[in-house]
Amino acid sequence: MTDFVPNAEVATGISEIWINDAKYLMSLELVSGSDWYVGAVVNEELAFLDFSRLIKKTLAFTAVLIVIITFVLFAVIRHLFKPVGELREALKNVASGEADLTHRLRTDTDKEFAELGHYFNQFVANLHSQILASKDLSILVKNHATLTQSAAHETEQNVNKQMDELNALATAIEQMTTAAEETAKSTLEAAQSASDVESNVLHGVDIVRETESNIQRLSGNIHLVSTQSDKLVESTKSIGSILEEINEIANQTNLLALNATIEAARAGEAGRGFAVVADHVRLLSLKTQEATKEIHAKSEQLLLTTSSISDAIGVSERNVKGAVNSARSATDLLSVVQQNIENISVCTGQIATAAEEQCNVSGEVSRNTQQISKLSQQVTEQAEETNHYMDIQIAEIDKQQSILERFKL
């Protein structure tokens, strides 16, 4: 077989082969019980010649029939689907142009198209009502969006004012904290000064008490001197009395001497010696009187001096007593001052503690104020973002309204 037909495949069934550039159909069948094949070879063009003619005739008839059927169907469909054209035009009007939603289809046609028109009219009516509702809703949403935008803008302004007030509050709190720190520092210095003053007052109390003791001892000494001065005055007065007696004795002696001289003169030579003695006695009596007068003058002067000293000592004694009382009053006053200084120390300590607590509270308030300022800043940013989104929303609503305005309602 391969010698007869080169490159041919030996297989049962129908296969295509080429012989002398012509296409043939070959059919082989295996003979049972042997390796032999029984086959037939025929030219493909000759084999399908009648079949091709039949196909051509059939195709021509079919084409003519299709043309006739097409014209018939076109006429029938045109008649039957005239309502569909109306539906198409209605849909075209809805989809383009003025988007007239007031147009309705006739429902006095065939049952199917009447139902279709009815449902179309119902759909358009529902669409009409929905678009009206959407239009009203878009207007309402736009109004609410405008109000929300105004509220967001007002919120932004209020938050900005709040931030300004918070900044002013933070500045005031910082100043208050600084003042509280200075107050605490000054209070501590005042407490230290009060402690120093208290120490000085205690030292002053000791000095005043020591002075009081010295004055009391001085008062005792002055009282003793006053007593001795009084005794001296009394003694001086006694000297005056004694001098008066001596002066009286001298006067008596002088008179006696004068009488003795007179008697001696009467006696003559016998009484001359007695007269000399009497004369000496008289002279001594006169000197005694003069000395007595001088002593009396001195004693008077001594008495005056002693009286002045006694008066001065009395005044000094009274002054010393006043000084003692003043020292006691000063001691009491210093005790009161000490107590007041202790109270001041306690108060300054409390003030320092309160100032320190105020510093801590002010610091906490300052931190809270800063946190509130940060939150306010975030609120401002959110308000700005909300305002931006509301602008976008209003623009989108305007677009939606412009789209809805295209529909004829």
Image: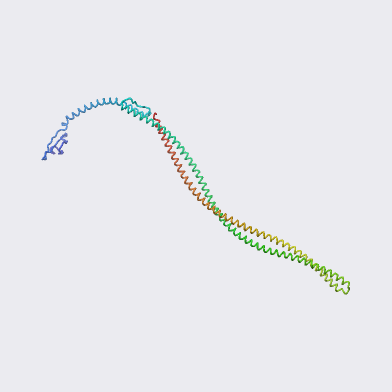
Q: Quadrant of residue 408?
A: top left
Colour convention of the picture: rainbow
- Residue positioned most to the bottom: 270
Q: Taking 191 as reference, is 327 left or right? A: right
Q: Quadrant of the C terminus?
A: top left
Number of callouts: 0
Q: Quadrant of the N terminus?
A: top left
Residue 168 percent coordinates (x, y): 51, 45
29 versus 244 height, above or below: above
- Residue 133: horizontal and vertical position, in percent? 40, 32
Viewer-nearest residue: 242 or 274? 242
Residue farthest toward the left in the current orientation of the protein? 33
Image coordinates for residue 234, horizontal then vertical, percent: 74, 65
Image check: 95 left or right of 284? left
Residue 117 x, y percent position in the rendering = 33, 28
Quarter assignment of residue 282: bottom right
* Above or below, 331 relative to 116: below
Quadrant for residue 35, please give it. Answer: top left
Classify 347 as above or below 11: below
Q: Image height check: is 291 above or below 368? A: below
Left or right? Give the position of 245 relative to 265: left
36 sits to left or right of 222:
left
Q: Nearer the viewer, residue 215 or 174?
A: 215
